[in-house]
Image: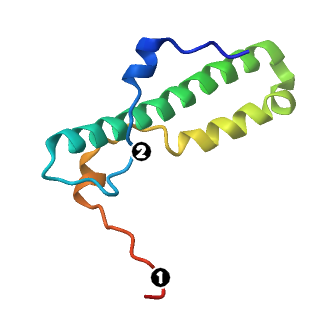
Amino acid sequence: MPTPLSASHISRRPTVPPTFEGVNYDDQTALKAAQDSVIKEQWVRSMMARLVREELGRCYYREGVNHLERCGRLRDRYMELLKDAKVKGHLFAQQNYVPKTEEGS
């Protein structure tokens, strides 16, 4: 059963999606909220990869010579998470944002 979230945790959650889509760059509050949201999302992905890596290490140690058969699911999950695990910052996404255009217009 998941742990219930506290009121202080809920108040600190980002209220904007982790993208610069629709952000007014002249509004510093909205820009900073988008930057924080992008950074927090990158850190969440990084920490998820770290947790899976730690569990994979415990599985390798626990299973011994059978780790190839019994830890394959964790290994595959870790390899998928590793693609996005690096915290890159927000500047590239902010400076190279290309707004989506509707197709067929």
* Residue indicated by mark 1: 103
Residue 30's place in the image compared with 1, above or below, is: below
State which quarter of the image contains the C terminus: bottom left
Structural crowding at the residue carrying mark 2, measured as other residues with C-alpha within 10 Å and reported as few (<14), some (14–19) or many (≥20): few
Structural crowding at the residue carrying mark 1, measured as other residues with C-alpha within 10 Å and reported as few (<14), some (14–19) or many (≥20): few
Residue 82 disc label: none
Residue ID at (39%, 21%): 11
The quarter of the picture where residue 51 lies is: top right
Residue 84's place in the image compared with 96, above or below, is: above
Inspect the image, locate mark 1, and give the three-letter code of the amino acid beneath it. Answer: Glu
The one of 3 and 49 positioned closer to us in this rendering? 3
Inspect the image, locate mark 2, and give the three-letter code of the amino acid beneath it. Answer: Pro
Please state if 37 lies on the left or on the right of 74 as rendered. Answer: left
Residue ID at (69%, 24%): 56
Disc 2/disc 1 C-alpha distance (Å): 23 Å
The quarter of the picture where residue 5 lies is: top right
The quarter of the picture where residue 99 lies is: bottom left
* Residue indicated by mark 2: 17
The one of 58 and 18 positioned closer to us in this rendering? 18
Element at label 2: loop
Residue ID at (34%, 57%): 21
Element at label 1: loop
Q: Position of residue 80 (x, y in %)?
A: 62, 44
Q: Position of residue 61 (x, y in %)?
A: 74, 14
Question: What residue occupies the far bottom of the structure in this picture?
Answer: 105
Residue ID at (47%, 82%): 103
Q: Earlier in the sequence, mark 2 or mark 1?
A: 2
